[in-house]
Image: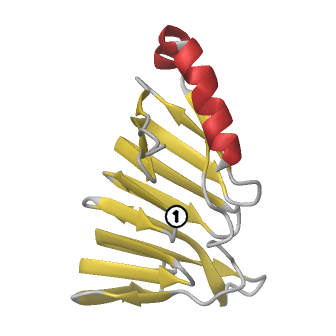
Amino acid sequence: MTRFLLILAVILGLPAAVAAQGTSIALATGAFSSALPVEVSADELSVDQGTGEAIFDGNVLVVQGDVRMSAGKVVVVYATDGTNSANGIARLVASGGVTFVTTTDAAEAQTAEYSIEGGTVTLAGDVLLTQGQTAISGDKLVVDLTSGSGRMEGRVRTIIGRSSN
């Protein structure tokens, strides 16, 4: 959060450059862990053994630790070992309006890809990230879950909340 506030202070000093080029942000990383199991619920499930995908459709809710993601549709792509046997989840691709919520942050977008192997989340299309009273929006947000750093791109706009002091 401290890194996020420092970056926002820079944004206030350079609003034209930020709007044109994008900006870096931070996202709570303690909530994301590839070691935790992933629970998925939906109205419907179809599995394609040929592609190694499971497609959850309708009111999809994905939970991993303190992270919750909801979407209209989520495709689960399984990692495979040398014998093409499923070996855990490689990534989740969500569409149909996506919402990520952690204990400290919330993000909305039209689509999202959560790469469990790569440790990244990419949100695209009308992205809105809120942290407390602070909000930042743009066209695309890529977050490195290992470092907690991220980059908002495409017509970035921010609203910084007031302190009650």
At which x and y percent is residue 131?
48, 52
At which x and y percent is residue 135?
41, 42
Q: Quadrant of residue 154?
A: top left
Q: Quadrant of residue 62?
A: bottom left
Q: Amino acid at mark 1?
A: Thr
1 left or right of 77 in image = right
Q: Residue at x 31, y 51 (%)?
A: 110
Direction front: furthest residue: 165
Q: Quadrant of residue 74?
A: bottom left
Mark 1 surroundings: few (<14), some (14-19) or many (≥20) residues within 10 A: few
Residue 55 can be seen in this image? no
72 left or right of 15 in image = left
Position above or below: 105 against 24: below
> Foreground: 82 or 151?
151
At which x and y percent is residue 42?
28, 86
Q: Residue at x 52, y 80 (%)?
A: 52
Q: Residue at x 78, y 82 (%)?
A: 82
Position above or below: 60 against 45: above
99 left or right of 13 in image = left
Residue 90 can be seen in this image? yes
The coloring applied to the image is secondary structure
24 left or right of 64 in image = right
At which x and y percent is residue 94?
38, 64
Q: Residue at x 56, y 12 (%)?
A: 14
Kind of element beneath mark 1: loop
The residue that mark 1 highlights is 104
Position above or below: 132 against 89: above
